[in-house]
Amino acid sequence: MDPHRPAVNSAPSHRPAMVRRALLSLCLAGLAAASSPTLLRSATGKYAGEFMSIGVGGSAFVSLADDVTAGYWNPAGLSRLSYPQLGLMHDERFAGLVNYDYGGVAMPLGPSSTLGLSVIRLGVDNIPDTRNAGVDAAGNPLPPDEWENFAGIDPARITWFNSADWAMYVSYSRRVSEIFSYGANVKLIRRDNGGASATGVGFDVGALAILDRLTLGVNIQDITSTLVAWNTGRNELIIPTLKLGGSYCADLFGQRLSPVADVDVRFEGRGSSANLNAGPVSFDFHAGLEFAYNEIAALRVGYTDIGSVSVGAGVKLPKINLDYSFSKFDSEEQLGNTHRISILFTLEAERFLRPGN
């Protein structure tokens, strides 16, 4: 996050132009589908895309992400990559009951553009299905509609299933100047819950401005509204979310100190469940602080909109970054804590360096 970044040649390239035209075509197609009156009238629109708001690596990175994870946080940040990167993350929530995983890859294209691919999965695995496992007093199989004769469960007749939400992001980013970058995502959403499944296609757009030591970011998620259609006939609508963020690069004892803050602005009437609300508009806040020592080791602390505090640390090795964070879940009924481990591989070799750097 060095504010003094090398100049980038912004000469035009045919490949970025082709990618932009493809993204534009997909956005127009998604807008036409999402604006279909029949579909919108039958859709519900609150918390449908909640699994995509958990975060990758941290909780306030709209302006700070300048590595492969920017494909999730703000696609405009991918333009700050100098080398190809691969990122992986595993997050165990509520004492391992819920698994949250991320994988991403990003590749610089020419002097000023970047292409990325990211996948996230939130899942509860190995859920027992006992609907067809009931038996009567004689041990005979019991149809689900005859529970009045229920006497027990036959373990041999228990089946297992997973409940999982998936999102795949295809990202494009371009740096227009040393100050301004923009980017866009096309994302495919897939949800599976036993025999029920749903699919949707959404679009995000983002921008990033670097003003000396201050960086400002904006990411409009699901900008056309995203319809998620279930095979049961139910339709869900993910309303656009406006994510705003700012970060500052300060000096402390000759090292880097970076305070960061984000706000998620939603328009689906979350009411008192949000940190702040005004009619149908709600605001949820995130904040963090990172202290980096010689750009080799880092200590972090963060605060999320649900009131949880996380602490973490990271170390930068040759071509590899390792990060760990811990979050305590506070509630009257303790559900366990959250542990998150991330690893980042950088192909930091001269032959992979972005042209012009």
Image (cartoon, helix red, strand yellow):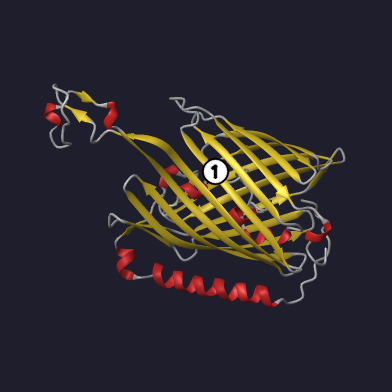
Q: Nearer the viewer, residue 301 or 26?
A: 26
* Residue at point 80%, 66% (across, down): 355
* Residue at point 45%, 62% (across, down): 201
Locate residue 293 relative to residue 121 in the image: left or right.
Answer: right
* Residue at point 15%, 25% (across, down): 136
Secondary structure under tag 1 reads strand
Q: Disc 1 designates what residue?
A: 101
Q: Amino acid at mark 1?
A: Asp
Residue 323 at x, y = what percent? 68, 38
Locate residue 183 relative to residue 1 in the image: left or right.
Answer: left
Q: Nearer the viewer, residue 23 or 59?
A: 23
Residue 66 at x, y = what percent? 70, 54
Residue 228, by quadrant, is bottom left
Residue 148, by quadrant, is top left
Residue 65 visible in the snapshot: no
Q: Nearer the viewer, residue 276 or 340?
A: 340
* Residue at point 75%, 64% (across, down): 179
Residue 47 at x, y = what percent? 41, 49
